[in-house]
Amino acid sequence: QQQVKQSPQSLIVQKGGISIINCAYENTAFDYFPWYQQFPGKGPALLIAIRPDVSEKKEGRFTISFNKSAKQFSLHIMDSQPGDSATYFCAASIAGGGADGLTFGKGTHLIIQP
Amino acid sequence: DSGVTQTPKHLITATGQRVTLRCSPRSGDLSVYWYQQSLDQGLQFLIQYYNGEERAKGNILERFSAQQFPDLHSELNLSSLELGDSALYFCASSVDLAGAPGNTIYFGEGSWLTVV
């Protein structure tokens, strides 16, 4: 059972454009939503995270938008740069841990074209 | 560098064999997680330990087992290996439980397992 659905699977964006990756979750008990960035040959690294008490969180060029009623959240990368080319994973978990630890989406392979 | 150390980085073994993957968490981290990453299944949560005790279990096969030792390092044992077990296995660690306020989960660089 896939509890976090991520789209698109791959995305090509021109340099300077906005990259948008979407995720939807099913388990209403989830209350922590991180995004991870993974470069080839490396482990995933935390990029930004949000909790459901806010609808948006911004850190530099990265913004998470969260819609609790729709059970959806998205990552926006403003002014996308070639160095942002990586695989991005959304994830969800329950504070204090749950049976699934961090549940990940299947990832989005992002390519920023110069 | 996340501070999570995994060994070996690469491993090739035959079907039916048994291997052990080792993980040293970040200094001070009590939680250790194991994930399996494959092209078709993405990042799958296997198991979590917290301060030596099993805390959460995910999609871990019965042929797989793990433990966390008193010094907090962890080992993932994979036995009766099949071709389909070929994947990248990640260890991750954090101070607290997943999702706890302010708790960040850090991933190692993974152990590539190829079963031939």
Image (spheres, coloured by chain):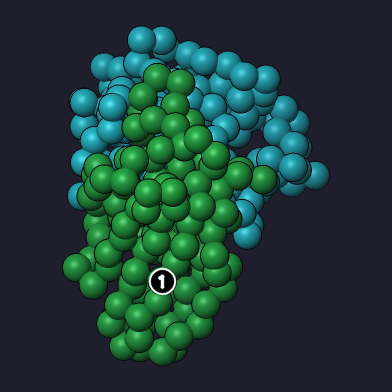
**Is residue A71 shown left or right of residue A114?**
left
Residue A85 seen anywhere in this rendered image of the structure: yes
Q: Chain of mark 1?
A: B
Q: Which quadrant: the N terminus of chain B? A: top right
Tell which of B79 and A76 is nearer to you: B79
The location of residue B60, given as percent across then percent down, is 25, 60
Q: Is residue B92 above or below residue A57?
A: below
Q: Residues within 10 Å of mark 1 (few under 14, many from 20)?
A: some
**Is residue A96 shown left or right of residue A33?**
left
The location of residue A99, given as percent across then percent down, is 21, 41
Identify the chain drawn in green: B
The location of residue A97, given as percent across then percent down, is 28, 33
Residue at x 35%, y 80% (from the top left corner): B18
Residue A107 seen anywhere in this rendered image of the structure: no
Q: Which residue is mark 1?
A: B20
User: Which residue occupies the extreme front position in the image?
Assistant: B70
Q: Which quadrant: the C terminus of chain B? A: bottom left
Instruction: Indicate the colour of chain A.
Output: cyan
Residue at x 75%, y 37% (from the top left corner): A81
Q: Amino acid at mark 1?
A: Thr
User: Which residue occupies the extreme right position in the image?
Assistant: A114
The location of residue B9, given as percent across then percent down, is 58, 68
Q: Is residue B7 above or below residue B45?
A: below
